Amino acid sequence: MKHWPDYVQAAREIYEACGLRPGETMTIYGDTGREPEVFDAFMAAAQGAGVDPATIRVPSRKPLVEPPPQAVSMATDANDATVNEVKARRRGRREEGRRGAGT
């Protein structure tokens, strides 16, 4: 199991790869199958980067079978970036983040 500093560092690397800038907004999205520490670390890294984060956590789903709830899609579309367990997406482009905290 990774430790808190590993999660925070992984989040920082993903944010840097996405080119997030202070003042931008982002959604950290995941499900209850992920440790709460992952969400906390991604939130801390975002705040440390000057990004305005929000987290959305839903009950566990079958990742490639069940799409996220419509409210999640609406919320993530309204932000500059979205991070989930395996990828990060910036509006207008997509960055694969396989080194994310969940892998």
Image: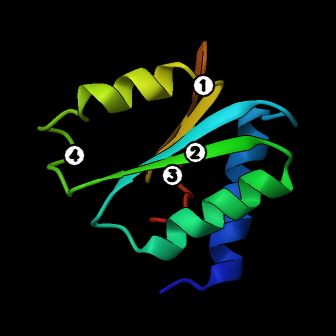
- Secondary structure, mark 2, is strand
Q: Name the residue tied to disc 3.
A: 98
Q: Name the residue tied to disc 2.
A: 54
| Cα–Cα gap, marks 3 and 1 | 21 Å
| Cα–Cα gap, marks 2 and 1 | 10 Å
Q: Earlier in the sequence, mark 3 or mark 1?
A: 1
| Cα–Cα gap, marks 3 and 2 | 21 Å
Going by the image, does 64 lie left or right of 91? left
- Residue 48 location, x and y as percent? 84, 57
The label nearer to you, 4 versus 3, is 4
The label nearer to you, 1 versus 4, is 1
Q: Earlier in the sequence, mark 2 or mark 4?
A: 2
Q: Name the residue tied to disc 1.
A: 79
| Cα–Cα gap, marks 4 and 3 | 15 Å
**Circles 2 and 4 in contact, beta carbons < 8 Å:** no
User: What is the three-letter code of the residue carrying label 2?
Assistant: Ala
- Secondary structure, mark 4, is loop
| Quadrant housing the C terminus | bottom left
Q: Residue at x 78, y 42 (%)?
A: 51
Residue 12 in view of the camera: no
Q: Earlier in the sequence, mark 3 or mark 2?
A: 2
| Cα–Cα gap, marks 1 and 4 | 22 Å
Q: Residue at x 62, y 30 (%)?
A: 81
Q: Residue at x 48, y 28 (%)?
A: 76
- Secondary structure, mark 3, is loop
Q: Name the residue tied to disc 4.
A: 63
User: What is the three-letter code of the residue carrying label 1?
Assistant: Asn
